[in-house]
Amino acid sequence: MLFHSGSECESAYAVNFVSQFGRDKMSCHASRATRSRQTGCGQGDVRYHSAIGSNSQGAVVPTHSICPLQQMRTAMPARTHQSGMLEPPEFLLFDLGNVLVHFDHRVACQQLQALLGGDEQQIWEVLFERGLEREYESGMPAEAFCQRLREAFSSEASDRMLLEAHADIFTLSQSMVPLVNQLSAAGHALGILSNTCSSHWQHCCRKFRLVRTLFETTVLSFEVGAMKPDPAIFHKAVERVGVAPARILFVDDLQQNVEIARAMGFDAILYSSAREFCRELMARQVSLNF
């Protein structure tokens, strides 16, 4: 499946919608600075993520929250999707691919073909039809991933070259940038729950400041050893976030992931566009930085 970036029109809409939406709000959540004092988080996690971004050795850096909440946030009654009276979430948990960033696996196949030989379709088959990509996203070490590629195509390409070719496929979702920035500035706790591999995650942290600085908690399949829609990764998300599922707003672009999250008690929405995401925030009375 191929994914492409959002249009400039949608990005402009998001900016205008955020401005109007913010003026309609009566209050906003506690500032991020206040939450940092309460939980011990703050500049430390910005420096931590910056360290990830500057890592040029390709080493896997642990990315779970470095400052776990000292106590569970108060559990609130579950929201219902039928009542129309949705409460603001305590934590917003985002999918990475096709929500915060866009990607195209065909680009990876093109770039790998220059290193491995063969043709792009053969590389696609090895990665996606034979399951190598899924193994990598489930925790296979980067070195083993590269060795499997070299063996499949009798190549001598270095790990560094293969990982760069495999990972340089992402663009930022410009239509989501103003929304995520305003949510963060208003003091909302943000996190990422993603099926991804070590090289993709490190690439996004290096390339996109938004990814490496605005999300206090990350739950990544290659670290957890489980992939959505496996309930195990959602259980790990609840454990790391420290919030009852009903108080977590989970945003994903795949219906199967949204359905399992709802079955586990999350307030989950299917992402289609920044415009619709704005409407979902309004329905939940989520305040922004205005």
Image (cartoon, rainbow, N blue to C red):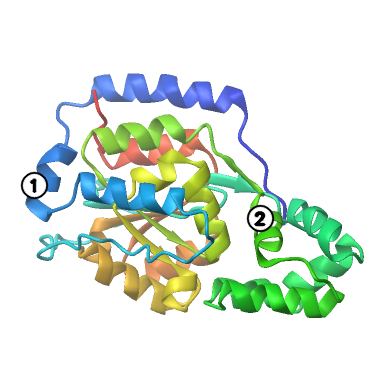
Q: Which mark is residue 46?
A: none
Q: Which residue is mark 1?
A: 37
Towards the viewer: 77 or 9: 9
Residue 101 in which image quadrant: top right
Which residue is painted at 52% across and 43% down in the image? 207
Q: Which mark is residue 164?
A: 2
Q: Position of residue 225 (x, y in %)?
A: 46, 79
Q: Position of residue 272 (x, y in %)?
A: 55, 44
**Camera-nearest label, 2 or 1:** 2
Residue type, mark 2 in image: Glu
- Whether residue 17 is visible, yes or no, is yes
Q: Position of residue 89 (x, y in %)?
A: 24, 50
Q: Position of residue 124 (x, y in %)?
A: 80, 66
Residue 187 lies, with reference to residue 146, above or below; the image says above
Residue type, mark 1 in image: Arg
Towards the viewer: 252 or 187: 187
The N terminus appears in which quarter of the rendering? bottom right
The reply to whether the C-beta atoms of the residues labelled 2 and 1 are less than 8 Å apart is: no
Which residue is painted at 14% across and 60% down in the image? 76
